[in-house]
């Protein structure tokens, strides 16, 4: 039976983690160096000086592909519990996975039909 006492370790761990994050943020602000200057404020990446403007327009297709990758990649994670417990879930679990896959495939075909996966357009 679940009682509020069962959640005490979770609450304590959350409080310790949040306290540690807050402590580290405060300490780095207080103890860190405060130097400003032309070289300190300059952009730096991989030892190569920055050239040009970083605010160039990027194709929406790039962002669409990234968002769709994350969306479908996260959906794949939901197959893991089924793969681990497929024998115990039986036919009912198999039908649930078929419904999940059918919804997943409907979304995939919708994205495909809309042309979100076409780079040439």
Image (cartoon, rainbow, N blue to C red):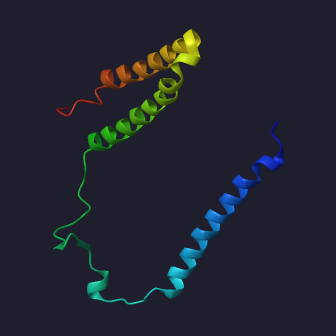
Disc count in the image?
Answer: 0
Q: Name which quarter of the figure residue 13 lies in.
A: bottom right
Residue in the image at 43% along x and 88% along y: 33
At which x and y percent is residue 120? 17, 32
Residue 48: % across, % down: 16, 72
Side (left or right) of 114 relative to 75: left
Residue drawn at the location 27% of the way across and 87% of the way down: 38
**Residue 45, relative to residue 65: is it above or below?**
below
Quarter in which the N terminus is drawn: top right
The residue sitting at 63% across, 64% down in the picture is 18
* Residue 109 vertical placement versus 2 (above, below): above
Query: On screen, 3 above or below 116?
Result: below
Spot occupied by residue 70 in the image (x, y as percentages of width and height): 39, 39
Give the camera-side residue of 73 and 53.
73
63 displayed left or right of 103 = left
Front-lying residue, 23 or 8:
8
Figure quadrant of residue 72: top left
The part of the image, by quadrant, that contains residue 15 is: bottom right
């Amino acid at each position: 039976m679940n009682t509020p006492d069962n959640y005490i370790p979770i609450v304590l761990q959350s409080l310790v983690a949040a306290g540690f994050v807050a402590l580290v943020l405060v300490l780095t602000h207080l103890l860190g160096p405060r130097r400003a200057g032309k070289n300190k404020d300059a952009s730096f990446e991989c030892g190569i000086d920055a050239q040009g403007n970083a605010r160039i327009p990027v194709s929406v297709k790039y962002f669409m592909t990234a968002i769709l990758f994350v969306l479908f990649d996260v959906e794949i994670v939901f197959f893991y519990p089924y793969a681990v417990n497929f024998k115990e879930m039986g036919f009912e679990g198999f039908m649930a996975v078929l419904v999940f896959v059918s919804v997943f495939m409907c979304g995939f075909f919708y994205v495909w039909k809309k042309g979100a996966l076409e780079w040439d357009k």
